[in-house]
Amino acid sequence: MSVNGIYYTCPLSGEVIPKSDYVSHLETFLNSLEPVPSMETSAVKIMCLNTHRENREKAIEIIGKYLNNIKSNPDEDKYKKIKWNHKLFQEKIHSQKGATDFLKSIGWAEETVDDI
């Protein structure tokens, strides 16, 4: 039997997947692991499902800034909230697969708050 094309063996599922389907297979597998993604699963999603390196690294940098602001200013409530509909958040964080899962896994929660 002859097989044409490039195939990968998924390190998580063990399945042999055509290269063209690999990222979607990985995403489906990761999404099936747990109803609420853990920090580890979310980090794997960020690193493996976002193929544009610069965008992925920018999202990680911004998440790091969110966390450093809270660490440096634990008593300031303004650093404990993110405007999820803010243009920067939508473009830089929400657009990256796994990023909002990561924030939720470390304690962030979506809430509707007046005056934000």
Image (tube, rainbow, N blue to C red):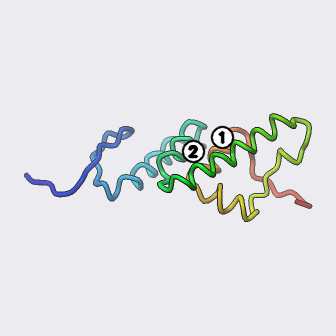
Q: Do the residues labelled 2 and 1 touch (CB within 8 Å)?
A: no
Amino acid type assigned to the residue bearing label 2 in the image: Pro
Taking 116 as reference, is 74 above or below it?
above
Q: Mark 2 points at which residue?
A: 35
- The percent position of residue 22, horizontal first and vertical second, equals 36, 52
Residue shown at 54%/47% (left/top)?
Answer: 46
Q: Where's residue 24, x and y in %?
A: 41, 56
Label 1 neighbourhood size at 10 Å, few (<14), some (14-19), many (20+)? some
Helix, strand or loop at disc 2? loop
Report the side of 13 relative to 100 (left or right). left
Q: Which residue is drawn at 68% across and 62% down?
A: 90
Hey, which quadrant is residue 15 in on the image?
A: top left
Q: Pinpoint residue 31: horizontal percent, then vertical percent.
A: 50, 48
Give the Cα distance between marks 2 and 1.
11 Å
Of mark 2 and mark 1, the one earlier in the sequence is 2
- In percent of the image, x 7 and y 52: which residue is there? 1
Circle 1 residue: 105
- Check the picture and name the quadrant holding the C terminus: bottom right
- Left/right placement of residue 82 relative to residue 96 reads right
